[in-house]
Image (spheres, rainbow, N blue to C red):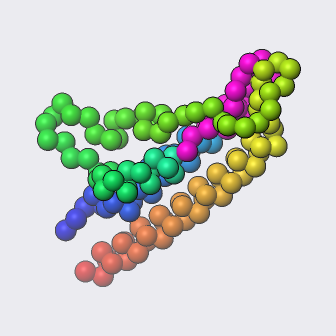
Amino acid sequence: MKSLTNDSALTVAQRALNGLSYRKDLISQNIANIDTPGYLAKEVNFEETLKRVMDDGTNLVQNRTRPGHMSMDDKSTSDFYAVQNRPGGSLRNDGNDVDMDQELIEMTETELKYQTLTSVVSKKLALLKSIASER
């Protein structure tokens, strides 16, 4: 029987939740730096990274063939997802481009995605638990 840790759907969901959490951290960082001269708003597009990895047929569940090998769990979220300056936006006189309205919209969308994905994962785990208890 395949273990839960090798379930590719749960692995992708875990990576997506990590990406969403990381996005919330970056949005919070942007908001915290709204008055910092020269600060440019950051973003992370983890959806493209996940899609590219899945389209390439790369397995997100990494097996260790030697004790010294790192697993994907050993990598930090920031190593897995690329952070970039948010394109667009307008620079203020102090060189800062953080737009509070944009940040609040991004935070709300990210939180809704996080809640939805958490709900889906919970339902899948409940289904697996139900199946296991019937055996």
Residue 20 in the image: state x and y as whole percent.
56, 48
The residue depicted at 76 percent of the width and 36 percent of the height is: 89
Q: Nearer the viewer, residue 4 or 87?
A: 87
Residue 119 in the image: state x and y as whole percent.
55, 65
The verdict on residue 34 being magenta is yes
Left or right: residue 101 versus residue 23 is right
Image quarter where the N terminus lies is bottom left
Left or right: residue 120 versus residue 134 is right
Residue that lies at the very extreme toward the bottom in this rendered image: 134
Q: Which residues are magenta?
A: 25-45
User: Where 12 falls versus 97 (above or below)?
Assistant: below
Residue that lies at the very extreme toward the left in this rendered image: 66
Q: Is residue 11 visible?
A: no
Left or right: residue 25 versus residue 81 is right
User: Where 66 falls versus 50 (above or below)?
Assistant: above
The verdict on residue 132 being magenta is no
- Find residue 114 and report its image quarter: bottom right
Residue 30 in the image: state x and y as whole percent.
70, 32
Image quarter where the C terminus lies is bottom left
Q: Nearer the viewer, residue 109 or 114?
A: 109
Q: Is residue 52 visible?
A: yes
Q: How many marks?
A: 0
The residue depicted at 37 percent of the width and 56 percent of the height is: 54
Q: Nearer the viewer, residue 40 or 7?
A: 40
The residue depicted at 36 percent of the width and 72 percent of the height is: 128
User: Where 130 falls versus 3 (above or below)?
Assistant: below
Residue 84 in the image: state x and y as whole percent.
58, 33
The residue depicted at 53 percent of the width and 60 percent of the height is: 118
- Find residue 64 and report its image quarter: top left
User: Where 55 falls versus 85 (above or below)?
Assistant: below
